[in-house]
Image (cartoon, rainbow, N blue to C red):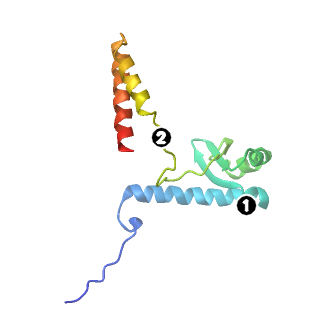
Amino acid sequence: MTANNTTCNTPLSYQNQTMAYFHGQIGQQKRLLHAIQKLLPFDLADHIHCCLIKGNQLLVYTDSPVWASQLRFYNAAMLASTAPLVATVQIKVITQQVGFVTHSDRKAQLPCAEKIEMLQKDSRNIADEPLQAALLKLSATLARLSNKN
């Protein structure tokens, strides 16, 4: 019996127009980022994380408000380098890294069983039916979640 040598293809090796479009957009944004970074002093260019063109606007993303204020002094240079495509420059601050979260360290703080029971009893005496139904559903969910833990 002979072993089959199979290779794993990357997603970009398939004929997929959507992936090809997004790959092209990423390449365009990288080229734009490098072009803008070449215009700026090294210490300032190091704090630009992303550049993209949206409509007739150049969006420049940096990591702090201090660097954003410094970048505003270079608006004219950035406009001149992208003149036919861009009419304005907008500088934005990225406040946190965005990515996929595999797990969360946060746990819900569930009320004790007595408070859940009190919520359930008190909600039966409420005259407003939608509110009563919502509170009964909430108390049932809290009871179910507290039984899991």
Amino acid on which disc 1 is placed: Lys
Question: Between residues 96 and 94, which one lies in front from this camera angle?
Answer: 96
| Residue sitting at x 39%, y 18% | 122
Residue 144: image location, x then y, percent: 34, 37
SS class, disc 2: loop
State the image quarter where residue 7 is shown. bottom left
11 above or below 136? below
Q: Which mark is residue 5?
A: none
| Residue sitting at x 62%, y 48% | 96
Instruction: Residue under label 1, please give it.
Output: 38
| Residue sitting at x 51%, y 55% | 25
SS class, disc 1: helix
Task: Decide which of tag 2 and tag 1 comes sooner along the chain.
Answer: 1
The CA distance from mark 2 to mark 1 is 48 Å
Residue 48: image location, x then y, percent: 69, 54
Q: How many residues crowd mark 1 within 10 Å: few (<14), some (14–19), many (20+)? A: few
Instruction: Residue under label 2, please give it.
Output: 108
The quadrant of the picture occupied by the N terminus is bottom left
Residue 56: image location, x then y, percent: 60, 41
